Image (spheres, rainbow, N blue to C red):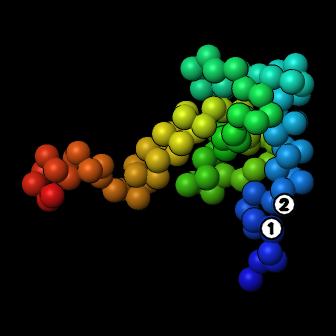
Amino acid sequence: MSRKGKHPRSGSAKVRRERKWWLLEQFGDGESCLCANGCGTVLFFESVTVDRWPIPGVLGGTYARDNIRPTCLSCNSSEGAKLARKRLGIMSYEEAKDLGYI
């Protein structure tokens, strides 16, 4: 069982904060950077999310510095759901409805 206040995969709050600052420094000017998915969103400390890439989380990707990039919440959320559905063979609500399952 994990200790209170610590997430086993992404690390403690301190580690997550350091990771976000590192992304801003590596991919931007230390204060801001652009979303790595190319949507053009300017990200700051409060808005940057960590995307595990090139090896995504559903394929066992870790939060190692050579496997992360900065993304906006919108891009990161939609991309992860698509990968998970594809990996697990789960169809979307619309696909299930079209096939008559719903």
**Residue displayed at 63% across by 21% down:** 41
Q: CA distance from mark 1 to mark 2?
A: 5 Å
Within-10-Å neighbours for mark 2: few <14, some 14–19, many 20+: some
**Residue 42: x percent and y percent?**
70, 20
Residue at far bottom of view: 1
**Residue 38: x percent and y percent?**
60, 20
Question: Quadrant location of residue 1?
Answer: bottom right
**Residue 35: x percent and y percent?**
66, 25
Q: 98 and 89: which one is in front? A: 98
Query: Pointer 1: what residue?
Result: 6
Within-10-Å neighbours for mark 1: few <14, some 14–19, many 20+: few
Name the secondary structure under disc 2.
Answer: strand
Name the secondary structure under disc 1.
Answer: strand
Query: Pointer 2: what residue?
Result: 12
**Residue displayed at 89% across by 54% down:** 14
Is residue 27 visible in the rendered structure shown here? no
Is residue 39 visible in the rendered structure shown here? yes
